[in-house]
Image (cartoon, rainbow, N blue to C red):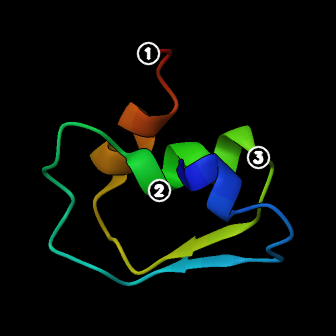
């Protein structure tokens, strides 16, 4: 669903939170899968590393 929403989007700016301890990194994963540039205000590197793991 997020992948559909990102069609034609130039950049994702994720400012919602707190979300770092969430199980899934859905917004970041959708940006990665659609090759959409992504900016986040998160300072939790573990969150970013988890998003790179295969599902």
Question: For the point 77% across and 60% down, which residue is it?
Answer: 36
Per the model, the C-alpha gap separating discs 3 and 1 is 16 Å
Q: Which residue is mark 1?
A: 55
* Image x and y of residue 53, in percent: 47, 21
- Graded by Cα atoms within 10 Å as few (under 14), some (14 to 19) or many (20 or more), the crowding at tag 2 reads some
Q: Which mark is residue 42?
A: none
Secondary structure under tag 3 reads loop
Is the Cβ of the residue at disc 2 closer than 8 Å to that at disc 1?
no
Mark 3 vs 1, N-terminal side: 3
Is the Cβ of the residue at disc 3 closer than 8 Å to that at disc 1?
no
Q: Going by the image, does 1 lie left or right of 26?
A: right
Mark 3 vs 2, N-terminal side: 2
* Residue in front for this viewpoint, 21 or 9: 9
Secondary structure under tag 2 reads helix
Q: Which residue is mark 3?
A: 34
Q: Which mark is residue 27?
A: 2
Mark 2 vs 1, N-terminal side: 2
């Amino acid at each position: 669903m997020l992948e559909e929403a990102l069609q034609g989007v130039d950049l994702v700016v994720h400012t919602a939170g707190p979300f770092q301890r969430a199980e899934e990194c859905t917004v970041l994963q959708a940006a990665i899968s659609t090759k959409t540039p992504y900016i986040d205000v998160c300072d939790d590197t573990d969150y970013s590393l988890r998003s790179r793991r295969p599902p």
